[in-house]
Image (cartoon, helix red, strand yellow):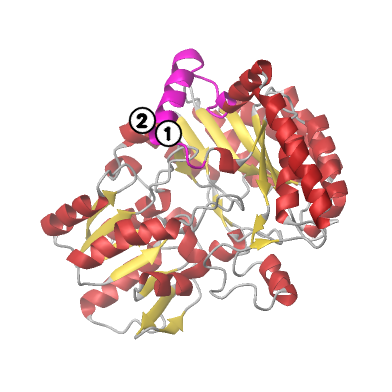
Amino acid sequence: MKIMMVNSNQNKIPVPSMPFGLCLVSSSLETAGHEVHFLDLCFSKKTTRDIDNAVKKFQPDVIGVSVRNIDTVSWLDTLFHLNSVKENVIIPLKNVFSGPIVIGGTAVGIIAAEMLGFFDLEYAIRGDGEAAIVEFVNRLEKKESLKGLGGLTWRKNGKIIEENPPLWVKDLDSLTLSNPHQYLELKAYKKFKAPIQVQTKRGCALKCTYCAYNVIEGDNYRLRDPKLVADEIEKLQKETGSNHFEFSDSTFNIPLDHSKSVLKSIIDKKLNNLNLRTMGLNPGTIDEEFADLMKKAGFKDVEVGVEAGCNKMLKVLGKNFTKDDIFKTARILRKINMPTMWYLLTGAPGETKETLKETFEAINKAVSKWDLVVVLNGIRVNKGTLLAKQFLEENPHGTDDNFLHPVFYEPKGLRLEELRVFNKRIGLKYSNYIFPEEYQRLPTFALRIQTAIMRTFAPNTPWWKFNILMRKIQKITGINTMKRLLYWFKDRNLSRKYN
């Protein structure tokens, strides 16, 4: 069959993300003998035109659409991405194509049924898409029943008639590689210093109360052969000319022995000039050997999900580490001079100004002034998480669409507006703090200017250090002082209002 795969994600903040999952699914379809046309709309200026041209030229039998993000998960100035996906992608597709449209991707893994209703579509695939989409297409081609198909959520006449468990791929080593250079115009992504994604595993066995990773990928680790991971990086470097790779695992360093084996396999390859990074390092399982291996393998920066610097809140969030582990991780990363982004989630159940003060004091003690601290105001409640269960127990009517549209947890005794002002007032004291809402509407040309500056004057420096530099300039020019005074007045007025 002829399958058109569409990347609907047009968000470029903080950098454009290559549609890694959609490339994997497309590669699996081609391996199964189907003809694939890949339509990447990330940089499209007129999606309706590009969709119309692609459908008319390719004449697909089935269209698959990847949906990456539901919203910006930021309480302040929230952007609901599904509105633009519906307007710019789904509706134009339905206007020129009457055949089956199936959606998949990270967002669909959380709210498949709700998203089908929002888009007025029939088919969605949750979880691993490689085997499920091939089976879906094969059954359509043979005109066989779709009943019982793993991962398929099926809607008909406005009602969900089937919502099957994901069809997990047990042996990840059996999958074809993503081959992004066959489907994407990599030059467009390289302009923004976007890395190529690589996975070493899927699934997450941790029990963080707010996180949907184990809903999306399952609650057990499925590990790839470390040597095959190294082989993939070597192959991609040779075929794409890129040396910039990001490990997109939910948590790269768990299980620790496996991540060390991956790093050793990469080191053994003796590849030149690798620029590696990873999201989601967990402070619970970092040791000096692991850090040294990262440095030797070619890591240039990392992200650490600490979420809080207060043991009470770490326990509430379901974390597997303590404040002492955060200090230990910071010492180890400083020892190898590893640039680090630290992520904080504020507003969990039981959060108070006292717990926030403890968190900020701990983080300021732990991190370097040239490390970036990203602070999220409020926690987005996702369907299927432990936090969602608690939220509904406390607010039975807190959502009317099962968390499709963003809902944020509000701690008792600390309103989200108070939380925001308190965080901002503290954050403005330090040049290395940033809040996502400050840059989520940044225009594309501004991103290009930022990237061009970094490429010219600091080509080997992580892009995010530009934000710290700008904040330091604001501090020198007195802009920060004016902002701090403004938020001091807001904090005082809120205290009068709510007390």
Spot the residue most to the left.
57
Q: Is residue 272 above or below residue 184?
A: above
Residue 62 in sight: no
Q: Position of residue 215 (x, y in %)?
A: 58, 65
Query: Residue at left 39%, top 48%?
Result: 19
Task: Give me the residue at 48% from left, 35% from top.
Answer: 245
Q: Is residue 426 left or right of residue 173?
A: right
Tell me residue 57's x, y (percent): 11, 55
Amino acid on which the number 1 mark rests in the picture: Glu
Task: Please rate how many residues cluster around mark 2, counting C-alpha atoms within 10 Å: few if below 14, some from 14 to 19, many from 20.
Answer: few
Mark 1 falls on what kind of element? helix
> Is 368 placed left or right of 101 in the picture?
right
**Residue at 58% over, 27% down:** 467
Mark 1–mark 2 CB contact (< 8 Å): yes
Residue type (three-letter) at the residue carrying disc 2: Lys
Q: Nearer the viewer, residue 84 or 453?
A: 84
As drawn, is 333 to the left or to the right of 278?
right
Task: Tell me, yes or no, whether the highlighted magenta stretch contains residue 96.
Answer: no
x, y percentage for residue 339?
64, 27
Image quarter in which the C terminus is found: bottom right
Residue 391's quadrant in the figure? bottom right
Question: In this orientation, which residue lies closer to the viewer: 361 or 339?
Answer: 361
Residue at the spot x=62%, y=18% of the render? 473
Q: Identify the element where label 2 is drawn.
A: helix
Image quarter hosting the N terminus: bottom left
Residue 156 visible somewhere in the drawing:
yes
Q: Position of residue 413 (x, y in %)?
A: 83, 60
145 to 306, vertically: above or below: below
Q: Which mark is drawn over residue 238?
A: 2
Marking on residue 234: 1
**Span of residues in magenta:** 440-466
